[in-house]
Amino acid sequence: MRLKQISRMNKYAMLLLALGLVSFAAIKLQERPTLYIIGDSTVQNSDGNGRNDYWGWGSLLYPYIDTSKIAVRNHAKAGTSTRTFILDGRWDKILATLKAGDYVMMQFGHNDHSGVDDTTKQKGSLLGISDSTKEIISIRTHQTEIVHTYGWYMKKFITEAKAKGAIPIVCSLVPRNKWDKNGEVVKELDYPEWAETVASSNGAYYINLNRIVASHWKEIGMANVKEFFPGDGTHTNLKGAQLNAACVIEGLKLVKKCPLNSFLK
């Protein structure tokens, strides 16, 4: 009888040990830092499925990152600018869970360029990085709204992330499929320089994604790059988005001091 009791006790002890290990593993997973990715449609597709054959690079970072050590959450949304990402409450949702040791990787600009006074969309921000403002009547609320510059909104993301103890990483916008007569990829106004200035002025890491992607496009050639764009010159297919994601990682590795590199495979 005593041997049976000992056997039962051993089985019970083993079960408790197994449950303890599972609980410990669950706690460790909860303690992982999180990489939050924010941006527009060129970054979106957080469900891992192409949208009308369009793919964003955000979810395609997963193969490069050790997700057993860091969680990845792609909150990018099609059609958003720096301004509307905030107005729609998307940034507040991230701030509610953002904690010390997390990362925020951001890429905006394509929709910031749309008109501030556009009465159908009205999603743009003012050009530049100054403290300039413009007062408009919002088509969302029919009330007065003070619109700021692209740089002002980017600074808001950076400073509020840092206030939470998180680490901001700014990416310049990916290029559109536009080439000049000299065979150079056309830059989107000065958005890459604006992004770099705001990042360096406010203690964020910076990846010149625009330049890195453009350099690869030049190697591939204009005719082959065209195959990345199934419908327009902005939204890439899976192959194009995979290249953009690889360029993000390439740029990240060039930022030697960025601690996110320790989570790369």
Image (cartoon, rainbow, N blue to C red):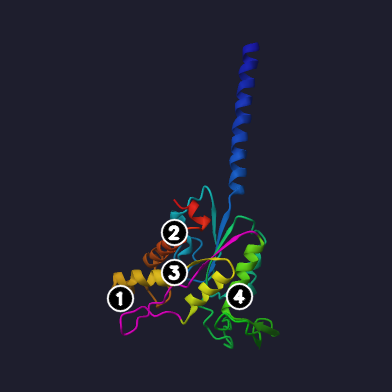
- Please state which amino acid type lies under the numbered disc 4: Tyr
Indicate which disc, 3 or 1, sits on the residue closer to the N terminus.
Answer: 3
Indicate which disc, 4 or 1, sits on the residue closer to the N terminus.
Answer: 4
- Please state which amino acid type lies under the numbered disc 2: Lys
SS for tag 1?
helix
Residue 183 seen in render: yes
Q: How crowded is mark 2: few (under 14 residues within 10 Å), some or many (20 or more)?
A: some
> Closer to the camera: disc 4 or disc 1?
4
Q: How far apart are marks 3 and 1 (CA)?
A: 18 Å
Count the marks: 4
> Closer to the camera: disc 1 or disc 2?
2
Q: How far apart are marks 1 and 2 (CA)?
A: 27 Å
- Residue 84 location, x and y as percent? 60, 76
SS for tag 4?
helix
What residue is pinned by disc 3? 209
- Residue 164 location, x and y as percent? 66, 60
